[in-house]
Amino acid sequence: MSTYVDIHIIQNLPPSCVNRDDSGSPKSAIYGGVRRLRVSSQSWKRAARLYFDDLLDASDVGVRTKRVAGVLAAKIAEDAPELTESALSLAEGVFKTAKIKLSPPRGKKNAPQESGYLMFLSAGQIGRLAELAITSARGGEALDARTVKKIFKEAHAVDIALFGRMVADDTDLNVDAACQVAHAISTHAAENEYDFFTAVDDEKSRSEEEEDAGAGMMGTVEFSSATMYRYATVNLDMLVKNLGDGEAALRALEVFIKGFCLSMPTGKQNTFANRTVPETVVVSVREDQPVSLVGAFEKPIPQDADRGYVDRSVESLVRYSSTIEENYGLRPLASLVVALQDSEAVSSVGERVSFADLPGRVRDIVAPRVPGQERA
């Protein structure tokens, strides 16, 4: 039976536009018959991956790019300077051997060929592929397709193990994601607003001539604000499989908890300075199945100027969680909660811990369920 770690977050977003659609408007969704502010799962996963850079060594983080041939060529040239001139053709040969199609980028002459989609590779995989290409070039031997593909399947980076990899040209090289992230939505109805802005021309404003002292530019920025429900779940058994090591999986889980909770998408960040931390984090360890608690907000939290949305969102979350447990018998093995404010709801949902202790406490709970970690 698999072990799942569910993360539920209630978080305030002040006026902001962290995730825009193609027209520049904050993304939204209809849920429960009303429009909600929405932040896409892809946006928050990207933010978490960027946060990993502060928590992990570069060797543990993957690179996702179409310019895979150029990346591999740079590594070949670094490790074998005498092959610098042929590094690009060697790199392209590696991907062609793996049946990954490369083609010239549009509108760029003499540029390295690119894959037709974003490829996710770990530093370890790039290093081993470079070593294989160098050995092949020095020995004058053809690359072995089976060996090349074997490298693609081993030594995955933490973010590849968590978020998966799709290789359209060869599904055998796919990596199933150990983590699923939901689109964050507001717990209440939320509408977009518009900010009309002007930027003053400093020199004009100082001029003594009779001319307008008005704006050098003007425009509008669309924004919204809301209390959000965020959810993610990690299949620990899949994470162990993807990384091939129980200790590495536990470390990746700790990093993900920190990164997912504290990261923030960067859209319009300089304009709104919208960096907030979660008001409440609930982490549940389960052995039955992942359980999102978004149904707590199918009926939107009504407006109440005296109480705001946070307290009532937490109360609704806890109440819905109890209802699921009572009616389906789906009870977590353990639940931990971090909260900025005390309340009866917070006290009832799980054991209160500090955020600094949260990842380690989760690790202690799940470690006995990871092969090789029973006595850790």
Image (tube, grey):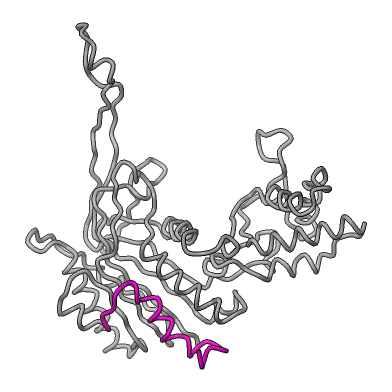
Measuring 37% from the left and 41% from the top, which residue is drawn there? 24
Q: Is residue 242 left or right of residue 304?
A: right
Front residue of this view, candidates 3 and 36: 3
Residue 45: x %, y % from top left: 45, 60
Residue 307: x %, y % from top left: 10, 64
Residue 244: x %, y % from top left: 62, 78
Front residue of this view, candidates 153 and 39: 153
In the image as oriented, which residue stretches furthest toward the right?
140
Residues shaded magenta: 350-376
Measuring 42% from the left and 43% from the top, which residue is drawn there? 22
**Is residue 374 part of the magenta span, yes or no?**
yes
**Is residue 155 part of the magenta span, yes or no?**
no
Q: Is residue 118 above or below residue 331?
A: above
Q: Is residue 101 above or below residue 157?
A: above
Q: Is residue 120 left or right of residue 196?
A: right
Measuring 61% from the left and 59% from the top, which residue is drawn there? 120
In the image as oriented, which residue stretches furthest toward the top?
209
Q: Is residue 308 left or right of residue 129?
A: left
Q: Is residue 270 above or below residue 55?
A: above
